[in-house]
């Protein structure tokens, strides 16, 4: 395996001795571990564990701190999925805090006069934003699963918003690519141009309004964000930009508690995201198609061919079937049945690519990516896998004045115009058409893997590529890799349309690329990407934890592709 990036980690493992009284067969983890995309978020989680919080309290601290230090990726104005395992009850819970479509956001609102998709509306400003879900998730975690009050678990985020943090390169680069949109809005200018010019690397970025909003949430819970002063400012800020939000629909937002999607792969139980994510269904299809193959024993070309053919088939189904299960009937059982996978497998030619047009469709571009994932395990064995987002870089670019809350542009994840690809080049039809209050289809796939010996937690940002990155991570763990090696794994991706294998630099050997092309695959190799179309670089930001229960070891792995300006931090308990 090639690791072609420096190993900069933003994950920590806190080790301590097993609690007395645990039988050997039910030993708790040898410590706690957190992997996130920013060192301050990881540190916030550990601070809360040290104050007596559990993994769910720590998740609140990590999530809210990411909202402060990674506004490019996620925040209070966005949403997310939290996969939870409660060690005491043994329950797995999927907390769906996905944004919902505003009532006024009918599909006609996103069409130009000649009936085309209005891409500006879909991705920028007031109409791009769904009703945020993340604040409700934090409240739910605190009241239903945590041990500490929100005033404690949100304290690190409030402090970081008020005192500021050093700006890192990714924020600066992302800002310059979204600058024109962000500077349309007075509320955004007030935050991002407070010194009169855009932030530079190393500047201290303070967000006093966001600190005040977090304080309202800490003091009043749900009502602190969804009702009263903050809610009124959100509605006013959106409507001042031509949107049509109402106080009533903010107050009506609710998280949904769902059963995670589960299936077996080899000797693993995979526990992952159900609709409105498309991730779990696609992972179940791909892995069940691949189940009988001895991938490890194959040469690279044949292995990649089979994996890509499985990806192609799952993404084709993603286009037509999944959506918000509260609005459309998603045939989850059928799509995830081993027999259905066997049918899909039978159509794979061992030596030839299946043209995606044989399954129907048209080619589309891929765009850049953000969002964030974090993984948490506490010393009792409680687990959290959470992926949260504002969708594209800095979401809609719109901050409602006086709130510090950067709103998402998640509306673009709906099939706003049937058959027209969104920013990630994926499209959809009726199942994912917008409707008032409906959740837009997602690819976010926070996942647990449990075997007789090991427990792993993983997830990543990356738009439509999330699913294939999690897939390659699952295959990596199945292959015996450690947490850091899984985070660093080279990536390739196929999403049915465009009909191309998209690869990171050096993800595939030159021989394999040539052989795959002979089989009929189009392969995009970054060095050949002179026009800048499709991906020209690396992607993803995978954060993972591996607890080897048999060996009594605990590891965390943090994607080396992004460093957020800091290096490895390994903390050890003084109990050692
Ligand atoms: O929910 C989704 O699938 C997308 N909104 C996630 C966006 C994302 O990962 C952005 N980064 N590429």
Image (cartoon, helix red, strand yellow):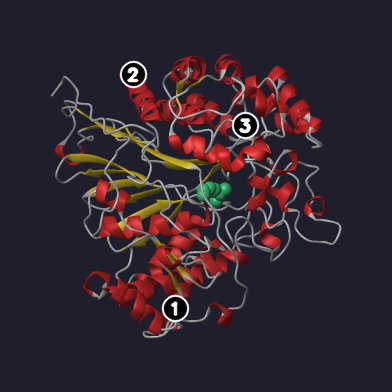
The residue at 63%/52% (across/down) is 413
Out of 562 and 137, give the one closest to the viewer.
562
Q: Secondary structure at mark 1?
A: loop
Q: What residue did someone put label 2 on? A: 52
Q: For the residue carrying disc 3, how many other residues have a C-alpha within 10 Å: few (<14), some (14-19), or many (20+)?
A: many
- Across and down, in percent, residue 52 comes to 33, 18
Looking at the image, residue 203 lies above or below residue 170? above
Q: Earlier in the sequence, mark 2 or mark 1?
A: 2
Number of labels in the image equals 3
Q: Secondary structure at mark 2?
A: loop
Looking at the image, residue 350 lies above or below residue 199? below
Q: Nearer the viewer, mark 2 or mark 3?
A: 3
Q: What residue did someone put label 1 on? A: 521
- How far apart marks 2 and 1 lie (CA) works out to 53 Å
Mark 2 and 3 residues: CB-CB less than 8 Å, in contact?
Answer: no
Q: Is residue 296 left or right of residue 305?
A: left
Out of 296 and 141, give the one closest to the viewer.
296
Out of 444 and 114, give the one closest to the viewer.
114
Q: Earlier in the sequence, mark 3 or mark 1?
A: 3
The answer to whether residue 209 is visible is yes
The residue at 82%/56% (across/down) is 112
- Across and down, in percent, residue 397 comes to 65, 37
Q: For the residue carrying disc 1, how many other residues have a C-alpha within 10 Å: few (<14), some (14-19), or many (20+)?
A: many
- Across and down, in percent, residue 166 comes to 43, 24
Q: Quadrant of the N terminus?
A: bottom left
The residue at 61%/20% (across/down) is 194
Q: Is residue 44 left or right of residue 197?
A: left
- How far apart marks 3 and 1 lie (CA) works out to 41 Å
Q: What residue did someone put label 3 on? A: 406
């Amino acid at each position: 395996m090639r690791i072609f990036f420096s190993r900069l980690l933003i994950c920590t493992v806190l080790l301590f001795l097993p609690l007395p009284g645990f039988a050997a067969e039910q030993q708790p983890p040898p410590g706690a571990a957190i992997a996130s995309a920013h060192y301050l978020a990881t540190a916030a989680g550990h601070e809360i564990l040290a104050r007596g919080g559990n993994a769910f309290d720590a998740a609140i601290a990590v999530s809210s701190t990411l909202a402060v230090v990674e506004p490019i990726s996620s925040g209070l104005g966005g949403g997310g999925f939290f996969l939870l395992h409660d060690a005491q009850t043994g329950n797995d819970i999927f907390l769906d805090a996905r944004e919902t479509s505003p009532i006024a956001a009918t599909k006609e609102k996103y069409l130009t006069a000649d009936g085309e998709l209005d891409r500006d509306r879909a991705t920028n400003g007031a109409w791009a934003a769904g009703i945020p879900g993340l604040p409700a998730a934090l409240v739910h975690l605190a009241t239903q699963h945590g041990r500490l009050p929100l005033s404690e678990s949100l304290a690190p985020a409030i402090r970081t918003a008020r005192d500021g943090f050093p700006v890192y390169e990714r924020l600066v680069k992302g800002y310059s690519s979204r600058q024109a949109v962000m500077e349309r809005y007075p509320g955004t200018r007030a935050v991002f141009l407070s010194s009169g010019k855009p932030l530079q690397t190393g500047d201290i970025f303070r967000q006093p309004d966001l600190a005040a909003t977090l304080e309202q949430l800490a003091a009043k819970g749900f009502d602190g964000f969804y009702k009263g002063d903050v809610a009124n400012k959100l509605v006013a800020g959106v409507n001042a930009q031509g949107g049509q939000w109402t106080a009533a629909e903010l107050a009506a937002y609710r998280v949904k508690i769902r059963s995670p999607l589960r299936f077996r792969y080899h000797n693993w139980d995979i526990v992952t995201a159900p609709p409105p994510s498309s991730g779990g269904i696609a992972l179940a299809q791909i892995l069940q198609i691949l189940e009988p193959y001895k991938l490890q024993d194959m040469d690279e070309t044949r292995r990649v061919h089979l994996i890509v053919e499985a990806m192609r088939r799952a993404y084709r189904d993603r286009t037509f079937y999944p959506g918000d299960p509260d609005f459309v009937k998603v045939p989850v059982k059928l799509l995830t049945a081993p027999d259905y996978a066997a049918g899909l497998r039978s159509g794979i030619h061992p030596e030839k690519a299946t043209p995606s047009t044989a399954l129907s469709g048209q080619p589309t571009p891929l765009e850049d990516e953000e969002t964030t994932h974090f993984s948490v395990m506490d010393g009792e064995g409680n687990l959290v896998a959470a992926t949260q987002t504002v969708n594209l870089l800095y979401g809609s670019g719109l901050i409602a004045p006086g709130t510090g809350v950067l709103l998402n542009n998640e509306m673009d994840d709906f099939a706003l115009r049937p058959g027209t690809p969104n920013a990630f080049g994926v499209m959809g039809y009726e199942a994912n058409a917008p409707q008032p209050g409906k959740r837009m289809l997602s690819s976010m796939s926070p996942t647990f893997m449990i075997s007789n010996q090991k427990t792993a937690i993983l997830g990543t940002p990356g738009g439509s590529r999330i699913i294939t990155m999690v897939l390659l991570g699952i295959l990596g763990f199945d292959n015996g890799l450690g947490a850091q090696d899984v985070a660093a794994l080279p990536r390739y991706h196929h999403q049915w349309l465009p009909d191309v294998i998209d690869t990171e630099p050096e993800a595939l050997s030159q021989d394999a690329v040539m052989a795959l092309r002979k089989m009929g695959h189009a392969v995009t190799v970054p060095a050949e990407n002179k026009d800048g179309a499709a991906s020209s670089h690396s992607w993803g930001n995978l954060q993972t934890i591996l607890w080897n229960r048999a060996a009594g070891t605990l590891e965390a792995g943090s994607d080396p592709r992004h460093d957020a300006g800091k290096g490895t931090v390994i903390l050890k308990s003084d109990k050692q």
